[in-house]
């Protein structure tokens, strides 16, 4: 049974929360090593034709079956509820299947789609453990919340609950899922090529089609046109992101529209998709640490209140947003400058990092340097630290003005304790902020000293439960084709559904 396997990364927006909703202001989004995996396999010769089975076995009652029929408008996708009576409908999965098949029937043909479905399809979805809180699982096993014990949990493990009740960690699970599923379907129906996913060119037409359709399905499923940075990072990996004009999707956000409108809007050649993507990587010897903190906040209500405040206080908001934007941009340029230092003066860079990792960032101005090159690296580190602190200060101020907990007092205390650890460059609350997560930028050592010291600090906080994530920056861009046999735990899951090599 041949299979298509596509994965897409999660994300953390480390700069640009709220601002990224406005095309004037870019955001800095880091793609994570934690990924969603989608496998599509044809059935046997005896399998039911024109039927697609979708399974998400990490959850209870998470299987859906769809029947694909000829229709005067091309093809019709109908969910067969009686096949999985315990499963609630999943609009994200349904819309991904329905919209991609509709698009494939238009750009290929309805008969082509029917031929591709002659043996039916099985689709299996699995997300890395980081997308869901592991706090309760570790507690039940009597284990402390550390990366050492997280590594001991089975990969792609069951959540023990339903999709409705699972506690997510804020890595953008819906965007990663939609991107992986849409892209896998596009490959399966020969709309795009797997080889395109290995290209470095973010402007490759096939990648653009995967991006446009993923953005569309994600927005339609959510019932609103968001900024799109989460889907963009799932497609392109870590980058500086400037959003697309939301007007581009308006014609196909209604229930009724012409087939021609669908293909025109989603076309790779449509200039209305004016989002900007500038790939970025963290400087050498730096990595990102993420943490799942207590219970989550209601992000939509936070966003709504901030946007209302901005509308009612335009001059004050513009001044503050411009100040935050200036520092957001400085964060990116700081990454680039340090990467250039490292490339031009590797020995000086490494020697300075070895010194800086021994001290808290507030003491870096006192670190002795042996050369002009080392002084340049040190100044770059200090600038990054100061930039993250200014961003935090201004984001807190915006939260106070809008009366929303962007960086609540508990998170301020947690971040202050964390950024005081030697070797920590800076940190913040990702995206819209709230109570549920933090990110840290730390200097990397061979023995992981900084990471261990940070986790020690987290373990001493009595009134908050802080669980680290295993995710790091994805070094392999965004969406990609995989050999599923190389993904730990996936083979065992697929075997339950008769998918084997």
Image (cartoon, rainbow, N blue to C red):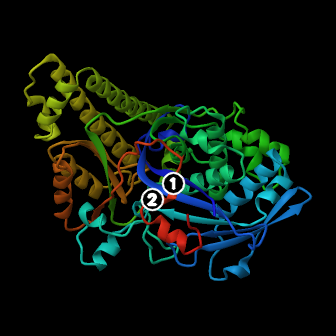
Q: Which residue is drawn at 56% across and 37% down?
A: 243
Q: 212 or 56, which is in the foreground? A: 56
Disc assigned to residue 487: 2
Q: Where is residue 305 in the image (x, y as percent from the top left)?
A: 50, 52
- Which part of the image, by quadrant, shows the N terminus? bottom right
Q: Are marks 1 and 2 in contact (CB under 8 Å)?
A: yes
Q: Which residue lies furthest to the top in this view?
A: 372
Mark pair 1, 2: CA separation:
7 Å
Q: Where is residue 428 in the image (x, y as percent from the top left)?
A: 32, 46
Q: Is residue 481 left or right of residue 269?
A: left
Q: What element carries label 2?
A: loop
Q: Which residue is drawn at 11% across and 34% down?
A: 355
Give the residue pinned by disc 1.
483
Position of 141 relative to 320 (above/below): below
- Which part of the image, by quadrant, shows the C terminus? bottom right
Position of 354 relative to 372 (above/below): below
For disc 2, the neighbor class at 10 Å (few under 14, some 14 to 19, many from 20) is: few
Q: Residue at x 47, y 61 (%)?
A: 298
């Amino acid at each position: 049974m041949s299979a298509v396997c596509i994965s897409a990364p999660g994300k953390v927006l480390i700069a640009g929360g709220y601002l990224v909703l406005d095309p004037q202001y870019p955001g800095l989004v880091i793609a994570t090593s934690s990924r969603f995996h989608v496998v599509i396999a044809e059935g046997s010769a005896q399998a039911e034709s024109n039927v697609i089975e979708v399974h998400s076995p990490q959850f209870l009652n998470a299987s859906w079956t769809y029947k694909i029929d000829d229709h005067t408008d091309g093809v019709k996708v109908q969910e067969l509820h009686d096949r999985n009576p315990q499963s609630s409908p999943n609009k994200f999965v349904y819309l991904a299947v329905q919209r991609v098949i509709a698009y494939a029937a238009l750009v290929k043909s309805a008969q082509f789609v029917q031929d591709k479905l002659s043996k039916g399809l099985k689709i299996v979805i699995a997300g890395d453990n980081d997308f869901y809180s592991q706090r309760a699982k570790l507690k039940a096993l009597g284990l402390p919340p550390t990366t050492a014990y997280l590594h001991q949990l089975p990969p792609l493990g069951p959540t023990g609950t339903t999709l409705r009740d699972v506690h997510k960690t804020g890595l953008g699970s819906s965007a990663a899922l939609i991107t992986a599923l849409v892209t896998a379907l596009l490959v399966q129906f020969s709309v795009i090529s797997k080889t395109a996913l290995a290209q470095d060119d973010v402007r490759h037409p096939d990648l653009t089609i995967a991006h446009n359709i993923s953005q569309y399905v994600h927005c339609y499923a959510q019932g609103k046109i968001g900024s799109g940075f989460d889907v963009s990072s799932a497609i392109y990996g870590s980058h500086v992101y400037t959003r697309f004009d939301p007007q581009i999707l308006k014609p196909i956000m209604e229930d009724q529209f012409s087939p021609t409108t669908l293909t025109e809007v989603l076309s790779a050649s449509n200039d209305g998709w004016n989002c900007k993507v500038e790939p970025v990587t963290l400087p050498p010897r730096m990595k990102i640490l993420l943490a799942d903190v207590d219970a989550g906040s209601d992000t939509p209500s936070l966003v709504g209140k901030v946007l209302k405040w901005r509308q009612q206080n335009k001059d004050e908001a513009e001044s503050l947003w411009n100040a935050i934007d200036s520092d957001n941009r400085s964060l990116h340029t700081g990454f680039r400058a340090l990467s250039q230092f490292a490339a031009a003066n590797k020995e000086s860079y490494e020697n300075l990092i070895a010194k800086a990792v021994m001290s808290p960032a507030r003491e870096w101005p006192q670190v002795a340097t042996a050369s002009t090159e080392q002084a340049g690296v040190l100044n770059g580190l200090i600038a990054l630290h100061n930039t993250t602190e200014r961003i935090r200060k201004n984001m807190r101020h915006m939260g106070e003005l809008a009366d929303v907990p962007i960086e609540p007092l508990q998170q301020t205390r947690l971040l202050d304790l964390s950024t005081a650890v030697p070797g920590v460059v800076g940190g913040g609350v990702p995206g819209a902020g709230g109570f549920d997560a933090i990110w840290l930028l730390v200097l990397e050592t061979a023995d992981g000293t900084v990471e261990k010291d940070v986790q020690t600090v987290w373990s001493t906080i009595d009134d908050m439960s802080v669980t680290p994530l295993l995710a790091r920056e994805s070094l392999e861009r965004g969406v990609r084709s995989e050999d599923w046999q190389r993904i730990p735990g996936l083979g065992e899951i697929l075997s339950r559904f008769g998918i084997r090599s």
